[in-house]
Image: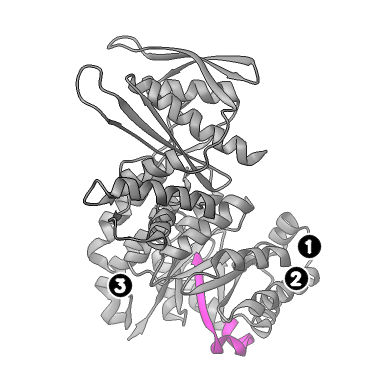
Amino acid sequence: MRTIKLSDITLRQAAQSRAFSISFKERIEIARSLDRLHVDTIELPAIQDPKADVLANKTIASVVGSAALSATCGMTEESVEQAWESVKGAKKPVLHVMAPVSAIQMEYQCHKKAPAMLELVRTLVAKARYYTEAVEFSAVDATRAERPFLYEVIGAAIAAGAAQVTVCDSAGVMTPGEWSTFLGEIYDNVPALRKVELGVEISDMLKMSVASAAAAVEAGADAVKVSIAAMDCPGLVDWAAFVGVKGDEAGIAANLRTTELTRSAKQIQWLLQSERSAGSPFDNGVSSEVAGICLSAEDGISELVTAVHQLGYDLSEEDAAKVYEAFQAVAAKKHFVGSRELEAIIASAALQVPSTYRIADYVITNGGSIGAMANLTLEKDGEKMNSVANGDGPVDAAFLAIEQAIGHHYELDDFQIQTVTEGREAMGSALVKLRAGGKLYSGSGLSTDIIGASIRAYISARNKIVYEEV
């Protein structure tokens, strides 16, 4: 019985497609879900934004336990080094070199001819091998490549240190019956291929990707690229169904936890397709779900810092000391301090900065038959900035008005409101978490008007961003 390895490319493909909207927080949650399902490899996209993407990869590396974490390299040696730095903290880091090998893709994507591409593949794979033995080379658009060149480039990648080679039917032109001949010819012309793992990445253009993957496995493939979401490749759920029905007969198995597969697939599909409503400051992934943190007065600063990192913050030593001091004051009065209390402590104690932006005035209108509208005036360096915005609700409209006034949209990582005191004049507390350059900033606001508290919390977080950008 052969165990076929499964590499999930959901995160890699989602970053390249305009059809999906995915936030920092959702990347982490999707990676967690895939790791719980026991996929063999989770593939990450090539780094586009050095700050945000590197931080996201490092965060994912810290939460993924059983799965290998594959970082896609760019087309330069510097990108290989950057990819390695982002995942080297993972338990099973992998570097993935992807290069087009068909004449049309080499010219269109890289403006290179075959000899130059061959040399580039040698260089990139060798650079990746310098950092780790776990190096994968993917021959993109392999089914449309000139066969002699395909054999040569695969051989060169193996000689340079690739431990896995993946051939990609990027155009989706190959039928299941053609895969056996195709892979047989590669094995015959590249004997070294039998010493490494062979993977396949198959487009679902002809709606036969699972059948094609099954044919490729029968012809000797060791790994299959899949996606838990509906993308242009074999679906993880569909492949699991195939193995469940035909696995014994075909002599193949997978390490998946199939009992959780359908539920996780629906959840991830919802995350990927739940689009931000037009003109709304709320991104996907804003929810009240928080990490399971429980601290007591007996916990030291090291436990506190670990919990702070778990929430996604990267504090300086000075801010960590301030947060710990504030935490001790709260913990002395409570049996335990949970995630929400710790978030509030961070927002109020860490990175206290001058108020670059101040709230001059605001008017919020909202009713059963009247849409929410915010008329807001901010002040910066003595200059007033006014903005009017409509929204799905009063907070939505207020945040959108702030964005329009400052001329910038930030990823809203989380938003929480709660009452602090009781009675008709009860005080309301709001917490806003914004993400800028991959880093998390939190702001808190307090007011008898919960909308006012929310506005103050957003401005507080924005002021921290401005302070660090200067």
Amino acid at pointer 1: Lys
Q: Are marks 1 and 2 in contact (CB under 8 Å)?
A: yes
Q: Position of residue 279 (x, y in %)?
A: 48, 25
Q: In the rendered image, which residue does mark 3 sit on?
A: 243
Q: In the rendered image, which residue does mark 2 sit on?
A: 120
Amino acid at pointer 3: Val
179 or 304: which is nearer to us?
Answer: 304
Q: Residue at the spot x=26%, y=29% of the render? A: 419
The quadrant where residue 259 appears: bottom left
Looking at the rendered structure, the secondary structure element under dot 1 is loop
- Is 325 colored magenta in this rendering? no
Q: Position of residue 67 (x, y in %)?
A: 41, 71
> In whole angstroms, how far apart are the C-alphas of marks 1 and 2?
10 Å
Which of marks 1 and 3 precedes in the sequence?
1
Disc number for residue 280: none
The magenta segment is 185-203
410 or 348: which is nearer to us?
Answer: 348
Q: Residue at the spot x=78%, y=58% of the render? A: 111
Please identify, in this view, whether the residue under mark 2 or under mark 3 is nearer the observer: 2
Q: Residue at the spot x=32%, y=86% of the render? A: 1
> In whole angstroms, how far apart are the C-alphas of marks 3 and 1?
40 Å
The quadrant where residue 167 appears: bottom right
